[in-house]
Amino acid sequence: LMTIREIFGPDLRGRKIAVSWAYAPSYAKPMSVPQGLITLMTRFGLDVTLAHPPEYKLMDLPLQQARENAAKHGVKFEIVDDMDAAFENADIVYPKSWGIESLFHEPEKALAISKKYQDWICDERRMALAKKEAVYMHCLPADRGHEVTDAVIDGPQSVVYQEAENRLHTCKAVMALTM
């Protein structure tokens, strides 16, 4: 949120973030980042489009909270099964791999399913679907060549290092508040 506000200013109404599943060769990445994003961004005035293949549904509670936040704050929250549709006219794209909750203990099945979606990658073609000034974000480490191409993560639209720096300052502030 800090990075988004630094780039777009404090009033985020009318901005769109695409939170999308992306392919990675590992099977059980956590769901915490996308679930946190959909609940936080709907509270702070962003329209949120969540994209994932059918098998990669997030947990019910964060989905319900995102819907409630969107209704309360007058923003949009939608779920699509098309990465391209999510990126369309987005101001921020946040593609990130996560696992299938019901298959966390069945890696072979999870890997077989994920291989069907190897084309779910953030590349230059998809970035061109977003707004010209759109930014690419990722909590890092990203799976280069799987979740994102080198051209995107190392390109001018990438703000991953700014995001990482801000995470450090945010963690320090939280520590100071709790000491």
Image (spheres, grey):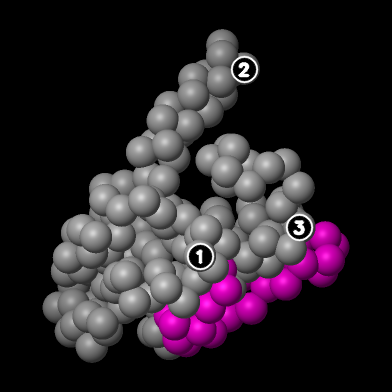
Mark 1 is surrounded, within 10 Å at the Cα level, by few (under 14), some (14 to 19) or many (20 or more) other residues, namely: few
Task: Please provide percent x and percent y for residue 161.
Answer: 36, 38
Rendered position, 102 above or below 151 = below
Disc 3 residue type (three-letter)? Arg
- On the rendered image, what quadrant is the C terminus found in? top right
Query: Could you say which disc has been placed on residue 172 in the image?
Result: none
Mark 3 is surrounded, within 10 Å at the Cα level, by few (under 14), some (14 to 19) or many (20 or more) other residues, namely: some
Q: Earlier in the sequence, mark 3 or mark 1?
A: 3
Rendered position, 147 above or below 2 = below
Task: Please provide percent x and percent y for residue 25.
Answer: 17, 69
Relative side of 152 to 37, left or right: left
Q: Is residue 69 magenta?
A: yes
State which mark lies toward you, 2 or 1. 1
Res. 153 visible in picture: yes
- On the image, numbered disc 2 is attached to which residue? 177
State which mark lies toward you, 3 or 1. 1
- On the image, numbered disc 3 is attached to which residue? 13
Residue pictured at 51% horizontal, 84% vertical: 85
Residue pictured at 82% horizontal, 60% vertical: 73
- On the image, numbered disc 1 is attached to which residue? 132
Relative side of 81 to 67, left or right: left
Task: Please provide percent x and percent y for residue 166.
Answer: 48, 32
Mark 2 is surrounded, within 10 Å at the Cα level, by few (under 14), some (14 to 19) or many (20 or more) other residues, namely: few
Specify the segment rendered in magenta: 63-90
